[in-house]
Image: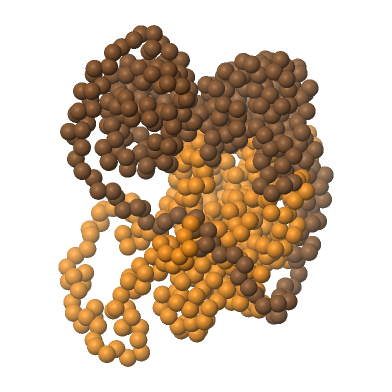
Chain colours: A brown, B orange
Amino acid sequence: MSKFLKSTALVAAFSLVSGPAFAEKLGLGRAALPEEIAAWNGDISPDGTGLPVGAGDAIDGEEIFAQQCAACHGDFAEGIDNWPKLAGGADTLDREDPLKTVGSYWPYLSTAFDYIKRSMPYGNAGTLTDDETYAIVAYILYSNDLIEDDFVLSNETFFDVEMPNAGGFIVDDRAETEYAQWSGEPCMANCKDSEVKITMRAMVLDVTPEEEGAEPAATEAVAEEVAEAETAVEVAAVDPELIKAGENVFKKCKACHQIGDGAKNRSGPILTGVVGSAAGTVDGFKYSKPLMAMAEDGLVWDDDALRAFLAKPKDFMKGTKMSFAGLKKDEDLDAITAYLASFPK
Amino acid sequence: MSGNETGNSPSRRAFLRGAAAAGAGALTASAANAATPDPLITEIQPWAQSFGDGVDETPYGLPIRFEDDVVRRNVEWLTADTVSSINFTPIHALDGTITPQGCAFERHHSGAIELRKEDYRLMINGLVDTPLVFTYADLERFPRENHVYFCECAANTGMEWAGAQLNGAQFTHGMIHNMEYTGVPLRTLLEEAGLNTAGDLKGKWVFVEGADASSNGRSIPMEKALDDVLVAFKANGEALRKEHGYPARLVVPGWEGNMWVKWIRRIEVMDGPVESREETSKYTDTLEDGTSRKWTWAMDAKSVVTSPSPQSPITHGKGPLVISGLAWSGRGAITRVDVSKDGGMTWETARLAKPGEKMALTRFYLDMDWDGSEMLLQSRAMDDTGYVQPTKAQLREVRGLNSIYHNNCIQTWLVRSNGEAENVEVS
C-alpha cells in the first residue's frame, strides 16, 4: 500500500476521501439481515479472516479431487489441455515460459480456499462443504510436495503451510521503473541507429482464426444407419452389478453431466437415453463444431462409438469440448456403458 | 503452419472480398473520366423504383446484412471452453469511438448469465454503519451520471509479447470497448451505507464480486472506489447486454477490465485486499528475475492503426488514403498521436478527431497521398501525464519476455504495395 500512496495522481484522488462531509442519505435500500450477509460474505483474507472451522487431508482430498476436479485439472492436478495446471512448476518463474501453479506461484493459501469454496467445481460452484474444501486444498498442496499425506489441513493448521512464492510479489512500480524514462518529447526524425528491418511476421506463424466458418460438410440422410444401430443396442444384456459399478465410474462425469429424472444440461448435455441415440440431438445443448460435424456424418452413440469416445475422447473426436482424459480400464468402459444404457429415453 | 504467405489467410480473403465489393461501378465512378455511362446512374434501379421495408420490419434493428462480417471473433486455441473465454471487438471495421454493444468484446469466467432485474440484489456489507441490500429499482432512484470510458482487458495484446502472432487488429487489440455509461457513483452507495464505522479510510479497500458462478472477486482500494467508480446499468443509452453484466456492472475507469465486475452483487468494505485468485494468480506481471508485479491496475497509454491493417487492407490503389486508428490511456486523456510510415524512423503528428477525453477512446486520422510504396505503419500515443507509448523493445527491457498482461507496445503493420497488410515486428 505504501508505494501506491506515493503516486501523486492517486494522492490527489485521495484528498476526495478526507474532504468535506458526506452527502445526505436518501434512505434507499433496506438493512441486510445477518443470514443474508452470512450467505454471501464468504471471502477469505490472507490473514485467515473468514476461514471456517473445518479440516481435511490429502487422502480424503484425492478422492474428492478425482470426482470433482480431475476432469479438467487431471488426476494429479497436472491440468488437461488448456485447463489450469495446479501442481508443478517449482523454480520456473525466472525461466522462459514459467509454469504458474498454486505451488509455484500463488503467494497466499487463503486464495485457494477462497476461490475453490466460492467458484469451484466448474459448472457446479459453491457446492463443496468446508471440510471438502480443506481436503481439496490439502490434495493440491500434497501434489505440489508442500505437505505430507498425513497432514491435516484445518483452520488451525492453515498457517503451518509455507507458500514458496509468498515473497515473490512487488507492488506496481511502473511510476519509478517506466513512467520517468518513457515521458517527455519523443523523437520525430532519424529515431533509429540503423535501417529498420522486419524481425518477425505473424503470417509465418499462421495461428490467426479464419474469418468465415468452414464450408458445411455435405450431409446425407443417415436414418437407416441410425435405425440399425438402435436395434443393435436393444440386444445388450443387463447386469445389475455392472450398472452399480458404472454408477461409481459416472462420478467422474457428474461435474458436467446429469442423467435420469430431472436431469438438466450442464457444461455437458443430459445423458438420459444417450445409448443408441444419434449424436448431437439433446435439445437446448450447444455442441462443439467437431461433434456436430461427426453428427452430420451420421455418428450414433452405439456401444462401440461410446467406448471409443470414452476411452480416448481427444483421439476419437479431435477438438471435442469434453475435457476428460478418458477411461483406461476395459472394466470401467463396460460399467459406464451399462450404466448409461440403464437410463433409456 | 503454412509456408505460403498469401495462402488461406483472412487478410487475403478480406482483400479479395473488399475488391469485389468495390465493384466495377464504384471504380468507374471514381475515375477522372468515365468511358461509359454508369448504369447505376443511367438506369432506374429497383430500390429507386418501388418500396423498401415498412416500419416495424425489425422492431429492434440489426446492422444491414452487407455488414455481417463486422462481428466479434474468438481465438479458439486460447482457452479450453467458451464459457471461460474471451472474444474480440472488430475494431478494424469500426470508426468513431463508441463501440456498439452488439460487437463489443465479451469476457466470461463462467458464462454470460441471465439475471432478471426482479431477481437482482446488491449487498453492501463489511465496515459500514448499516449493511444494506438494494434492488434494481433502488439503483434507479439514486442521482446518476453519464460518462464515456474504455474497458480494456489486461490481456489485450498479450499474445504479442513473445513476437508478432495474430494477424489482425481485431485479434491483437480487440479486447477493448468504449461506451457511454449511465450509473450511480459507488461513492453514493457506500455513503448510503455509511463509512463512519470504517474509521480512517486511508488503507481501506472494497471487495467486489459478481452474481455468476465465478463471482470474479476483486479488491479495489478505497481511494479509487470513492473517486470515479460507477455501478452502471445502461450503456450507449440502453440496458447493458447480458454479456456485459445485465442488469448492473461495475465501471472502474482506466483500470484493467477484470475489475469491472459484471452482475455486481456484493461490495464489502474491508481493512485489506482479499488477494483473490484474479488478483494474484492472474493479472499479475512476472518479470525477468521471476518476481511479479501486482496491483498493476491502470492501463497505460496505447494506440493502434485500425485501418489499413491486416483485416482492412487498402483496396483503392494509389492516391488519397485515410490512415485511422484508436488511442487511449487509463491515466488520463490522449493529447497527441504520432504516426510513422517507416517503422519508427520518422514520425508525423496525426489529427485527433476530437480532443482526447479522460480514460476514453480517442480517434485519430492521418490523411495522406499514398504513392503505392510499402509502409511499416506505426502509431504512438501520448497522454496528459507526458507519458509516451513505448516500443516492444522498451517494454521487454524492463519486464523481460514472460509477461502476459499490460502490453501497451507500439504495433507495426507492414502494408505492401498491393495494399495488403500484415502484423510484423521490426528492429
Q: Residue at x 62, y 50 (%)?
A: B154
Residue placed furthest toward the front: A330
Q: In this view of the protein, which residue sits in the foreground, A190 or B226?
A: A190
Q: Is residue B211 rendered to the left or right of residue B398?
A: left
User: In the figure, residue B261 lies in which quadrant?
Assistant: top right
Q: Is residue A233 rendered to the left or right of residue B374?
A: left
Q: Position of residue B149 (x, y in %)?
A: 57, 55
Q: Residue at x 39, y 31 (%)?
A: A309
Above or below — where is B124 with respect to B261?
Answer: above
Above or below — where is B419 with respect to B334?
Answer: below
User: In the figure, residue B45 lies in which quadrant?
Assistant: bottom left
Which quadrant would the N terminus of chain A be assigned to in this image? top right
Above or below — where is A311 with respect to B49?
Answer: above
* Residue A50 seen: yes
Q: Position of residue A17 (x, y in %)?
A: 75, 44
Q: In this view of the protein, which residue sits in the foreground, B55 or A43?
A: A43
Which quadrant would the C terminus of chain A be assigned to in this image? top left
Q: Position of residue B404 (x, y in %)?
A: 64, 50
Q: Position of residue A34 (x, y in %)?
A: 62, 20
User: In the figure, residue B303 lies in which quadrant?
Assistant: bottom right
Total numbered circles: 0
Q: Residue at x 68, y 44 (%)?
A: A98
Q: Residue at x 53, y 38 (%)?
A: A81
Q: In this view of the protein, which residue sits in the foreground, B222 or B90?
A: B90
